[in-house]
Amino acid sequence: MMKKEGFPKSIRIKKKKEWEEVIQKGEKNFGRSLLLLRLKTNKEKSRFGVSVISGIKGGVKRNRIKRILREVLRRNKEKFSPGEKIILIYRSRCPDIRYNDILNEFMNLVTKTDIKNE
């Protein structure tokens, strides 16, 4: 049987207090259309959050972008150390994005932060 892939609620940042903590104390890395926020904690599991600016009109478009962002995080969550809280925010007003464009920008942001941490 194949392993079920997904982005379970157990690894999501859902509480407003957690979001605010990552936004205030976390390390910010800006890309062309993405913002990556990282906060190291002493927990054993990493947690992830995804957001899209409200400038994109239409729920269908916003939700598609969120699905792409969650997929990028899900496939690359091993790149983060255990216990990190990560928020990925789509900041561009352009609703027409492709998975590969977001993946490339995300990988640039992750490698940029890894170089800073060493």
Image (spheres, rainbow, N blue to C red):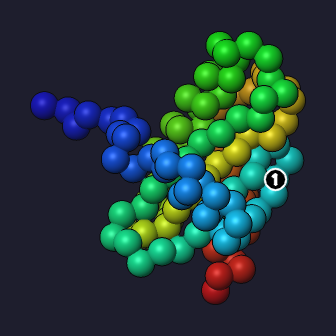
The reply, left or right, for residue 8 in relation to residue 53 is left
Q: Which residue is drawn at 70% across and 45% down?
A: 89
Q: Farthest residue to the bottom: give it.
A: 118
**Does dot 1 land on a helix, a strand or a loop?**
loop
Near mark 1 (Cα within 10 A), the count class, few <14, some 14-19 or many ≥20, is: some
Q: Which of 59 and 102 is in front in this view?
A: 59
The reply, left or right, for residue 79 in relation to residue 97 is left
Residue 100 shows up from this direction: no
Residue 98 shows up from this direction: yes
Q: Residue at x 50, y 49 (%)?
A: 15
Q: Farthest residue to the front: give it.
A: 17
The three-letter amino acid code for the residue at tag 1 is Gly
* Image location (x, y in percent) of residue 51: 65, 39
Instruction: Count numbered badges in the picture.
Output: 1
* Image location (x, y in percent) of residue 55: 84, 27
Residue 70 versus residue 63 in the image, above or below:
below
Q: Which of 109 and 12 is in front in this view?
A: 12
Q: Residue at x 34, y 47 (%)?
A: 10
The residue beneath circle 1 is 31
The reply, left or right, for residue 44 in relation to residue 92 is left
Quarter of the C terminus within the rendering: bottom right
Q: Which of 13 and 16 is in front in this view?
A: 16
Quarter of the N terminus within the rendering: top left
* Image location (x, y in percent) of residue 114: 64, 74
